[in-house]
Amino acid sequence: MDTSKEHLFERLKDKFEAIGQDPLIHLDGLVHAKPITYWDYIQTDALLSLQTMRTTLKDEMVFIMYHQINELLFKMILWEIKQVADHHALTSDFFASRLMRISRYFDMLTSSFNIMREGMDVEQYIKFRNTLTPASGFQSAQYRMIEFASTELINLIDNRFRATIDRNTPFEHAYNHLYWQAAGKDYNSGDKTTLLRLFEERYMDDFLVFMKTYNTKNLWTRFKELPLATQKDTELVKAMRHYDKTVNITWVMAHYNAAAHYLESGNTGVKATGGSNWKRYMHPSFQKRIFFPGLWSEEEIENWGKE
C-alpha cells in the first residue's frame, strides 16, 4: 500500500470511528454495492411519471411541466437562502455569491415565461384552465416561503395595513394581512375565496412555523447584522439590489405579462384560474413589495415597478 492509499484509509478510518462505526465493515459493504447510474441517482423514472393531465388538450402537458420546473427552481432558491440564514460567520463574499446564485435562478424563471407564452395555444389554455379551477399558481407554497425567508414580515404586509403592524404583532395577525391575502379575498367584504381557504388548510400551519423560524434570520435581517463597513461593501449592495429588483419587478412583470397574454386574449375581464384579482396583487406598483427597502432611495421606491 503506497503512501496516498494509506492516507486515504486513515481518513476513512477517522471518519467512521468518529461516529462509532467500524471502517472495515463499511469497506466490506462496498464489495457488494451496485454501481450508481444516472437514472437511479436523478430518479428519472419517478420524475417523469409525475405529470398527470386532467384534460385531453395537448398543451396542458406543457403547462404542468413548466410549473413543476418552477417548483424545482424554487427549491434550489430556498436551499441557497438557507445557507445564508444559517451561516455562523457570514462574510460579504459568501452573502453576495449566494445572492447571485439565487438571482440567476430567477433569471431562468423570468426567461422561461417566453416558453409558456409562446409554447401554448391560447385557445387550448382558455379551455383547460376552467378544468383547473380553483387551482392557481397563487398556491405555490415555496414561493411564499422565499418571500418569508428574504425579508422582514412588515415588508410583505398589505400597504393598507402596514401602519398598524410591528414586530410585536402576533404572527397569525400578520399572516392575515399579508399582501397576497388581497388576491384571495373579496376586496370589499374580506371573505376568503375557495382558492385561499384550500391553500390555508394545507399550508397555514407550515407557514406560521416558517415565518417564526426566519423572523430573525431572513436575508434582510442577516444583512443588517453585518458590521457597518461590510454593509457598505459595493459588491454586496449591488447583489442585494439586483436580487430585490429581479424578484419583485423583473420576474413579477414577466409573470404579469404572461398572465395578461392568456387572460386578456379576446376575453375581456377574464379572471385567473383560482378567481384571484391577479392584477391588484401581482403588479409591483400596487403593493411595492421590496425586500430591502433601506437600499433604495425614496424616488426609487416611489417609482417601484413603473419603469
Image (spheres, rainbow, N blue to C red):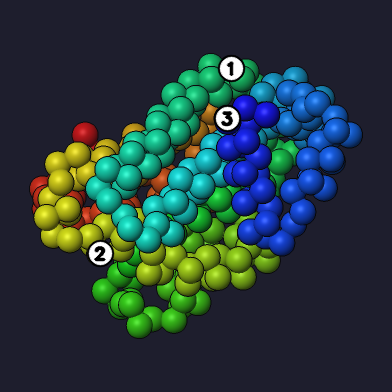
Residue beneath the point at 37% across and 42% down: 98
**Which of the two discs, 3 and 1, sits closer to the camera?**
3
* Residue 217, picture quadrant: bottom left
Mark sitting on residue 208: none
Q: Are dots 3 and 2 in contact, CB under 8 Å?
A: no
* Residue 33, picture quadrant: top right
Where residue 244 sits: x, y (%)?
Answer: 30, 45
**Which of the two discs, 3 and 2, sits closer to the camera?**
3
Where residue 241 sits: x, y (%)?
Answer: 24, 43
Q: Are dots 1 and 2 in contact, CB under 8 Å?
A: no
Residue wearing tag 1: 119
Q: Which amino acid lies under the numbered mark 2 shown in the image of this protein?
A: Glu
Residue wearing tag 3: 4
Residue beneath the point at 48% across and 62% down: 181
Q: Quadrant of the N terminus?
A: top right
Other residues around mark 1 within 10 Å, as few (<14) / some (14–19) / many (≥20): few
Residue beneath the point at 32% across and 45% down: 94
